[in-house]
Amino acid sequence: MAKQFDVVVIGAGPGGYTAAIRAAQLGLGVACIDAWTSPAGKPAPGGTCTNVGCIPSKALLQSSEHYEQLNEHFAEHGITAKGVSLDLAKLIGRKDTVVRQNNEGILYLFKKNKISFFHGTGALVAKTDFGWLIKVSGKAEEDLEARHVIVATGSNARELPGAPFDEDRILSNDGALRLGAIPKKLGIIGAGVIGLEMGSVWRRLGAEVTILEALPDFLGPVDRDVAKETQKALAKQGLDIHTGVRITEVKAAAKNVTVQYTDAAGAEQKLVVDHLMVSIGRVPNTQGLGSDTVGLKLDERGFVVVDADCRSNLPNVWAVGDVVRGPMLAHKAEEEGVAVAERIAGQHGHVNFDTIPWVIYTSPEVAWVGKSEQALKAAGQDYKVGSFPFMANGRARALGDTTGFVKILADAKTDEVLGVHIVGPMASELISEAVTIMEFRGASEDIARICHAHPTLSEAVKEAALAVDKRTLNM
Ligand code: FAD
Ligand code: NAI
């Protein structure tokens, strides 16, 4: 006899585990199934984000940033150190510990919220009188029945045709997070978020990093001023980025990888590297989930088709996160998970897609929310611009990190903030204020009139808001 639940969540990434917790908080009986297994053979809930995404990449970004600061920047503060060395095994081991702590944290939260956890692969098998029959296979073998199902099976790295991942020479994000030695030369295909973050990690640790990007523009969707400033800063650090390339062949050998490509000028080029990371986007995990058995509708790229409220084509089957349309971001997955749990409980869950922030954790960090200047122009919307450089911010000078600026775009008539774009120190934290203002449909004048602590980097946000009205105080 199948165990019965109000809600069964398939996948325990940020979308799934958050949905499970919220549903349990609302008094529903909840089970969550997740297939991820740690290198030690244990359940490892948390999905891509916890195991091979947000968390481990940020752990490595932090460690490599410390190393670079010590080698390149501490001397400016009068601090010199002799005999600096790097223990890569320890650095990677620390990252693994951080991941494990997060896996354990989620298992604890499941227990605390009385969520039944099943370690295995879940598949929708049939419609029943109760709701849906879900088969769990793998570590746990169970039949579950659910009134509501939330599909949160996430995504996987997309392979380049003709260059399958072996995680030795040709790496996805997974292999790039656990290299056993610092490569002399690392090649990266795709100058997107993963390419820039992982490229920064290995460059800081000593690799010569070359990034090949197909599009002619660097960071195409990002505000042009921000993209230009970021490209300048990353190039100065030594990231060798080529845009407008076309990859023609990738050949992995025992000790290296050869990439043939055509550059932006149309010339044939060859790159030989120790490892090649391919970061050209991600594909949804929907194979074997239920499209064949129960007719769960997928689009031509394999994403579960959902409406604005995350309802699939099947009654009481929902889908959230990377497996559905929209940005592939952990916080977007979480917001959708919470909203769906609330809808199941009869509440009015809501996700505002216009105020989802983006962050790229390079140095300088890049963060934005809302419309870019080129998007406003294309939409024919009248706008005002204010920007303020960190060079003129006292805290940034004290930190010794004055790269970049804050740029605010506001409606020409109403002054409503339409977009905020930051490149510079702690942009990841500063963007929150912009998200809040935009969520409340605030004006640039609102930011300008709010008291910001001194000296803080957030004063650059206030000054950018003052600049919209052409009245900066410190420039
Ligand atoms: P996932 O996190 O992919 O979780 C899905 C889970 O479902 C997995 O555990 C999977 O094993 C499991 N699963 C799949 N199929 C089944 C099945 N049939 N049965 C049982 N279990 C199944 N986003 C950010 O917002 N900030 C960042 O800094 C950031 N950094 C990233 C860095 C890297 C290197 C990568 C690759 C991604 C990063 N992301 C980041 C993106 C983020 O990881 C994803 O957007 C997020 O994990 C999506 O969450 P999800 O719950 O939809 O899916
Ligand atoms: P991406 O979409 O950010 O970047 C992929 C890049 O590869 C694009 O610039 C694209 O033009 C390029 N590309 C595609 N095909 C190519 C080809 N054949 N040759 C050369 N270049 C090619 O995808 P990425 O970096 O793989 O990351 C996937 C997603 O994971 C991101 O879009 C983001 O949603 C998420 N992520 C978020 C992070 C964050 O929030 N800080 C960090 C890392 C990932």
Image (cartoon, helix red, strand yellow):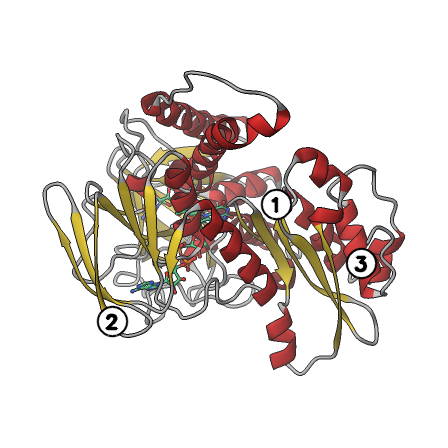
Kindly indicate whether the residue at mark 2 contacts the one at mark 1 (C-beta within 8 angstroms). Answer: no
- Specify the amino acid type for callout 3: Ala
Residue reaching furthest to the left: 254
Q: Which residue is mark 2?
A: 267
Q: Earlier in the sequence, mark 1 or mark 2?
A: 2
Residue 416 screen position, x and y as percent = 79, 67
- Specify the amino acid type for callout 1: Ser
Secondary structure of residue under mark 2: loop
- Specify the amino acid type for callout 2: Ala
Q: Earlier in the sequence, mark 3 or mark 2?
A: 2
The residues tagged by marks 1 and 3 sit, at their Cα atoms, a distance apart of: 18 Å
| Residue 428: mark in rendering | 1
The residues tagged by marks 3 and 2 sit, at their Cα atoms, a distance apart of: 45 Å
| Residue 119: mark in rendering | none
Residue 68 screen position, x and y as percent = 48, 32
Residue positioned 51% across, 61% down in the render: 310
Residue 374 screen position, x and y as percent = 60, 74
- Pick the residue in front: 38 or 84: 84
- Residue 441 in the image: above or below residue 450: below
Secondary structure of residue under mark 3: helix
Residue reaching furthest to the bottom: 380
Q: With 269 as the anchor, is 19 left or right in this view? A: right
Residue positioned 36% across, 40% down in the render: 34
Q: With 410 as the anchor, is 169 left or right in this view? A: left
Which quarter of the image is occupied by the N terminus?
top left
Of tags 1 and 3, the one toward the viewer is: 3
Q: Which residue is mark 3?
A: 465
Secondary structure of residue under mark 1: helix
Label 2 crowd (10 A; few <14 / some 14-19 / many >=20): few
Which quarter of the image is occupied by the C terminus?
bottom right
